[in-house]
Amino acid sequence: MNAKPATTPGPAKLEALADGRFKVYGALNAETVTELLKRSEAAFKGAVSLEIDLANVPEGDSAGLALMIEWLRLAKQRQQTIHFKNVPEQIAALARISEVADLLDCGAKPC
């Protein structure tokens, strides 16, 4: 009887700070990551290194993890280093279960 109304998440947002530093805001899920990937591809161009702060991501699922892995692939392709800060626990747990947690830690160093 007291069911929560379904809410549609707004788009996740990417804020460029300076010197390759970015903050992500909003949920990282199947409904938000495609658009965020499109925006980030252009935003990340030209940076030597990337630091992506996920402290303002309240939740994430396998699509969020897939986005982070795609960011790693893009960075490697562009010969950029990448470092993730404040990875949400949901995504970190999925990475551990999927045995890809080391990939998220390898962004800033050779693996």
Image (spheres, rainbow, N blue to C red):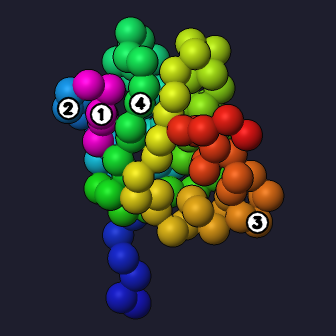
Whole-percent x, y for residue 44 in the image: 40, 19
Q: Earlier in the sequence, mark 1 or mark 3?
A: 1
The quadrant in which residue 59 appears is bottom left
> Which residue is outermost to the left?
17
**Residue placed at 36% from the left, 62% from the top?**
58
Q: Which residue is mark 1?
A: 21
Nearer mark to the viewer, of 1 and 3:
1
Q: Which residue is mark 4?
A: 50
Q: Amino acid at mark 2?
A: Leu
The quadrant in which residue 45 appears is top left
Q: Which residue is mark 2?
A: 17
Instruction: Tell me if label 1 and label 4 are in contact, CB under 8 Å.
Output: yes
Q: Amino acid at mark 3?
A: Ile
Q: Earlier in the sequence, mark 3 or mark 2?
A: 2
Packing grade of label 3 (10 A; few <14, some 14-19, many >=20) is few
Secondary structure under the numbered disc 1 in the rendered image: strand
Nearer mark to the viewer, of 4 and 3:
4
Q: Tell me the magenta residue range.
A: 19-23
Q: Is residue 88 visible?
A: yes
Whole-percent x, y for residue 88 in the image: 46, 62
Q: Which residue is mark 3?
A: 97
Instruction: Tell me if label 2 and label 1 are in contact, CB under 8 Å.
Output: yes
For residue 65, above or below residue 1? above
Mark 2–mark 4 Cα distance, whole angstroms, equals 11 Å
Secondary structure character of the magenta stretch overall: strand
> Which residue is outermost to the bottom?
1
Q: Amino acid at mark 1?
A: Arg
Q: Is residue 10 visible?
A: no
